[in-house]
Amino acid sequence: MAAKNNAKVLPRQGSLGWHLVDLIRTIRRPQGKMPTLLLLNLMILLVFGLIILFSASYVTGYYRFGDVYHYIRPQAILAVGGVGLMLLISKLDYHIYRRFTFILYGITVLLMIWALFCEPISGCRRWIHGDNLPFTLQPSELAKVAIMLGVAAIYQTKRNELKKYSYGILYPVALVAGPMVLLLLAQSHKSGMIIVLCITFTMIAVGGADMLQLIFTGVVGVIGVVAYLMTQEDYVETRLSTWSFSLDWDVLNYQTKQSILAIASGQLKGVGIGNGKQKHLWLPESVNDFIFSVLCEELGFLGAIICIGLFAWLIVQALVIAVQAPDIYGVVLATGITAQIAWQVIFNLFVVTSIGPNTGISLPFFSDGGTSLVLLLGEMGILLNIGRAGNQAQERAQREARLQKEAQSEHQIQ
């Protein structure tokens, strides 16, 4: 009778109370060791990024808003809050997100549609903002997370049927990434569309889909994207006409020229932190897409190498976590998080150095943008938890191997 009474007070499975109880159990559940090297690398990158952002933004903040802390103040506050969120998420079993994937995806779609009805900023409807809102939100950053969780959920559910075109490629591309890509196009967020597609195809390639099918789909997708862009008010022609891999000065547009000047001015050691000149309203988007140019001017080639090295080491550690994840859900999800950082860094560096055409892609942990920073730190929390799960699985395997060896030794003695 007592057991029945106790069972009645437990929350019904699937209810809000049940999810809260399970969340508390998840936090209290023993886990593996924290990937401390990844965490240390991330904190160095974050502090480094905040220092460079302040140096790059105080001039613009003063000239435009009369406040040298206009950009760094909210970014620093969100960074502190984001680190707290990251550490909390690192304690949550990453499998818990499968329950909320559909809800998160639906909320993201609604937010993306909401952005279409807000007043455009710089000709684009990418942000949710207004006089009655105390914040500005860019839902396309949340779209990346929703796509990662959606693709990972499909691959976990259909892990034994991924060689089929429908489960391995069609569903992740058409049902998960497809709606977000269409909404990104409606927002005139073509760079976001490219990043989303790169993330999706990286996850598919690592997850176990048939490679010939993936190559075929990728080729068709690239042709389709290029064909679409060429019809968009000379979008491709405009970008290519102002791009020169050989740095032809007569071809480059103003923004790229100022970026190259900033990078060249830094030489080996830079002009010193805070002493850059291009950020004095010469270099457009110095607090966002072209913040790496400011870094190069002030810290020189050595500072640039340190920055790239920190990102490279972060990506390598994240890939190790993905490889050691205990299940395909963790492998694919960790790959998606790593792919986002890797592709954004690559594209951003290509743009500021004119290796690739100019397109607006921010540098993770450095560029101004509260939504991006908080979500990136949240993603890193998920990655840390996958790392802890992988460490726990390795510790369990080592313990079982040791016990088995001891048992064999005792059997031989007997």
Image (spheres, grey):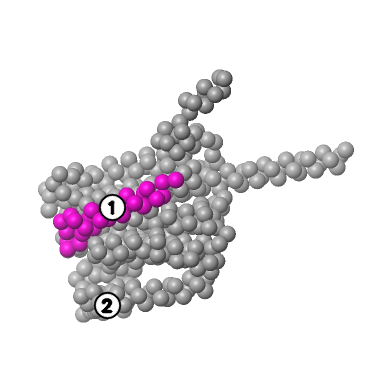
Residue 336 vs 395, above or below: the answer is below
Residue 121 appears at what percent x and percent y? 17, 58
- The rendered magenta stretch, by its main secondary structure, is classed as helix
Locate residue 33: give its quadrant.
top right
Q: Position of residue 158 (x, y in %)?
A: 53, 58
Is 110 part of what is drawn in magenta? yes
The residues bearing labels 1 and 2 have C-alpha atoms spaced at a distance of: 29 Å
Q: Which residue does the image show at 52% across and 74% down from the upper left? A: 212
Residue at 42%, 36% (x, y): give it: 15
Identity of the amino acid at label 2?
Met
Mark 1 = which residue?
A: 110
Magenta region, residue range: 99-126
Q: Is residue 95 visible?
A: yes
Residue plotted at (66% across, 45% down):
398
Q: Is residue 133 above or below residue 187?
A: above
Residue topped by disc 2 = 230
Which amino acid does the dot numbered 1 rest on? Leu
Local secondary structure at mark 1: helix
Of residue 395 and residue 76, the one placed in the foreground of this image is: 395
- Residue 304 higher or lower than 15, as above or below: below
Residue, far top? 2
**Where, by quadrant of the figure, is residue 357 drawn?**
bottom left
Q: Position of residue 270 (x, y in %)?
A: 29, 60
